[in-house]
Image (cartoon, rainbow, N blue to C red):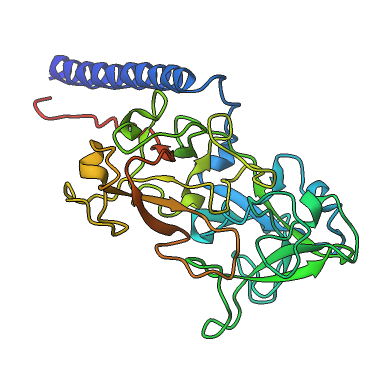
Amino acid sequence: MNTRNGCHRGRLAGVALRSLALFIIVLITSVHWTGEARASAAPAVPTQQALGRHFYLTPDLAYNGAAALTACDAGFHMASIWEIADVTNLIYDTGRGYIGADSGLGAPSYVTGWARTGYYQASGEDTPGIGNCQLWTSSSNTDRGSVAYLSADWLTDPRIGGTEWTYMLFTCNTLRRVWCVEDYHPSWNVGSYYLTMDTYNGAEMLSACTNGYHVASMWEILDPSALVYDTSLGYTQADSGQGPPSYQWAHGWIRAGNWAADGSPVAGVANCQAWTSNSPNAYGTFIDIRSDWTVERDIGIWLAFAGACNIERRVWCVRPPLRVYLPIVLRGL
């Protein structure tokens, strides 16, 4: 009996050791694969990010437009609105951030903070999502910057399309809070995406993405705040920060999940004959994040268009997180 129990324990120990060895091999392989996919290795990901990326609104109403970029703690940066678009993907840092009476462990509503836009350097005029205090260098009362806050009146507050955020403009001499989000780098355990710097026609676009990435389906990047924008590979604009570019020329081809379309100029249907055609008479679907926060969106935060397949455009690329599953199979032991 003791001999049989010892053999059984030995077989269990052997399975555990083999599973551990497999985990180490997969981990090493995944890190090596990530390194090949990027020009340089990503910094180590803090342990807390395994649970979710943290964000917060600064507790002090103390930052004019020229000071906004200095507001966040070490390890955080001034958030692009597109990095925090869906707050259910994030963890509100109650140890750092402003807390409302009914916040609980979530973010406060109806409290404004400066946020990056993804746009060019701009004074703002009267357009939320355009104004960025001359790229967060101005404290002038003649320049304007964009602020965002989570809706309080859920029925009537205006929204940044596809989100529960609403918007205002303030002159850049105004003291505001700042939205901050945790620094995060593309890594093996988090999905990342980018918009190519080069342009491609409809027949070329499937070859556009670098090693480890593939041409994105709309359904893979519908919510970009669940991903990290890879600024080392992707097209950026002056106020992108660590988020994606906005504005109608920062657009790219996207897969839609449809059949091989017959050339119909309908966004979401058009796909350049399953991305084999560069004909001016065939159409493909492309998308962008429009800068103007007041503009209605078509799908999530995105505007969608159909365009002729002979026109060269950028391409949206994505790399999903690498998931490792190591079941220990005890059958037959």
Expressed as whole percent of the image width and height from the top left, the position of residue 238 reads 69, 43
Q: Quadrant of residue 14?
A: top left
Q: Is residue 144 visible?
A: yes
Q: Quadrant of the C terminus?
A: top left
Q: Is residue 67 left or right of residue 96?
A: right
Q: Is residue 19 left or right of residue 119?
A: left
Residue 118 in the image: above or below residue 211: below
Residue 120 in the image: above or below residue 163: above
Expressed as whole percent of the image width and height from the top left, the position of residue 23 reads 35, 22
| Numbered disc total | 0
Decide which of 308, 39 is in the foreground and name it: 308
Q: Quadrant of residue 332?
A: top left
Expressed as whole percent of the image width and height from the top left, the position of residue 38 reads 50, 23
Q: Is residue 218 visible?
A: no
Residue 243 in the image: above or below residue 188: below
Residue at 89% x, 64% y is: 173
Residue at 80% x, 56% y is: 133
